[in-house]
Image: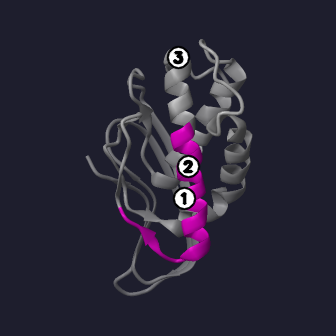
Amino acid sequence: MPEPLTLAALGGAAIAEGIKFLYAQAGELLRRRREHADGEAEETATPAVISEPELLPRLDLTRIEGLEDELRLLRSDLHEYATGVDIVTDPPDSALIQRVDALRQVFECIYGTRLMFAGEARRAADVSGAMTAQDVAGYVAAVRASGSGTFRGVTKVGRVEKGGEAVGVEYQG
């Protein structure tokens, strides 16, 4: 995987703040998932370290299911930086940049939208998501997206009940 140049250009202080946000948010998602396996999280305002989106979209917590292992592993990988035990150098180490970008990509799949750090050059979105369900009585989407870029969503369902809807990608232009 090539180095995520948009993150590498930010500098150590900005990356350190981004790590703290991603680490805390990953912990919050895992906690919410455990407490309310079938619930939905409210829209959440993003801190100043994130320039896009202004609000994290409403989240179906069951979308974490297929990405929970990656979320836990990447959160664990960044623990020492998030807690201040290790210091992010300026310029940041390329291996660290790749781990931060990998966690960001997991978030993008979970939320179905891209996350951009403040000061980061705008990049084309490349978001993928997948969801699996036996029965759908309401509405489900693998990806809810807006903006420009490439969006891929795969939805596998056993049965969609009358009035239900299952989509791969919901585009909110």
x and y percent of residue 152 in the render? 49, 48
Magenta stretch: helix, strand or loop mostly = helix
Tell me which segment is drawn in magenta. 20-42
Q: What residue type is labelled 1?
A: Glu
x and y percent of residue 75 in the render? 67, 46
Mark seen at residue 28: 1
Q: Do the residues labelled 2 and 1 touch (CB within 8 Å)?
A: yes
x and y percent of residue 94 in the render? 68, 19
Q: In which quarter of the image is residue 81?
A: top right
- Residue 130 can be seen in this image: no
Q: What element carries label 2?
A: helix
Distance from Cα at disc 3 to Cα at disc 2? 20 Å
Front residue (pair 4, 130):
4
Of the numbered discs 1 and 3, the one sitting upstream in the chain is: 3
Distance from Cα at disc 1 to Cα at disc 3? 26 Å
Q: How many labels does the image show?
A: 3
Front residue (pair 50, 138):
50
